[in-house]
Image (cartoon, helix red, strand yellow):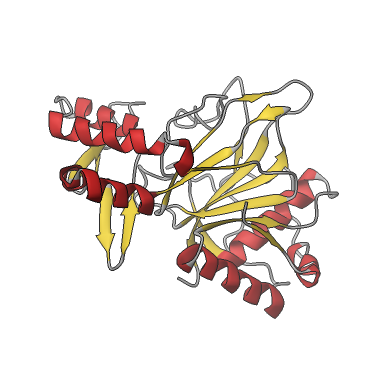
Amino acid sequence: MTTFRLPEQTQAALLSRAIPADQPLAAWPLDAPDGTTDTLRETCLDITRRLREKEGWLVVDTRLADLDDAQLCSAAWNLFTVLCRPVPQYRTGELMYPVEVSGAPTLASSHYSSSSRTGGFHTDGTLLDTAPDVAMLAGLSAADEGGETVLVDVDGLVAALAEKAPKHLAALGKAHPFHSGDSADDPVMLHRILTRTGNRTQVRYLRRYIEQGHRAQGRAVDGELAAALDAWDELIAQPVRQEPVLIGRGQVLLWDNFRFVHGRTPFTERLHRRRLRRGYGLLRAA
């Protein structure tokens, strides 16, 4: 696992702004804290290079696991706002969002975040006008068993399809309808699953949204696309391509949302719940 330990000199800056525990989810601050130091800025530039030019993901160890939940969330958010400009995760404006099992999800579109379901590899913000460059999961507690976030590098998937079935790449490179399926009033978005930009391939993917997008338009997924999606999912399911990451308390997982699809492993909660906090952002230094 790629772990990046924050320098001790950054801790005061991470704690320079306290965000109340009852802060509305749509009202978390967008700007970096006033207490941001040159050391923290330089650290975030290093993280940006790792996300853009190297591994594409990393676990940041804040070394603040002994703090209470509100302090940990504030520290994670302060780090995130130096690194990124936060963007809403839903059309209702939520910026910081709890990822934990709940009997009553607060949003119709957040069933996955509030459930223990697994699988469903996807990119985040698929239905947003502006999908995030970076996704963040900040750890408050892990489940008794399982609950790893699983990352799959799209570059490897594209290389495998280019070698074995280039026709599938062509199908995935066309614009397809995406729809949440939650309400007929929700818009149908047209996106390419794979987009080549310079020397990078960017991905937007959630198969259920693609199938529901076709249904919303009154048509079925054609055979060409269905075969490409099947091949894509078969590659994602190969364990050798998966990077499982268990996010511990005080750790922050960051990844390039356009380079990785992600899911999670099954988990069991007995004495300990799986509690994470999620953010979406656009890199300030891309």
Q: Position of residue 68 (x, y in %)?
A: 83, 46
Instruction: Report the quarter where the C terminus lies.
Output: bottom left
232, 258: nearer the viewer: 232
Query: In the rendered view, would you say 199 is above or below 235?
Result: below
Q: Is residue 179 visible?
A: no
Identify the residue shown where x is 61% and y is 59%.
80
**Residue 100 falls in image quadrant:** top right
The x, y position of residue 138, in whole percent, is 65, 47
From the viewer's perspective, tell me whether residue 120 is left or right of residue 41. Answer: left
Residue under the image location 41 percent in, 44 percent down: 123
Q: Residue at x 62, y 32 (%)?
A: 147
At 57% across and 73% down in the image, what residue appears? 45
Q: Between 249 and 234, which is closer to the camera in this rendering?
A: 234
Q: Which one is nearer the viewer's eye here, 23 or 54?
A: 54
Q: Is residue 169 visible?
A: yes
Q: Residue furthest right?
A: 66
Q: Is residue 154 left or right of residue 163?
A: right
- Residue 240 x %, y %: 47, 41
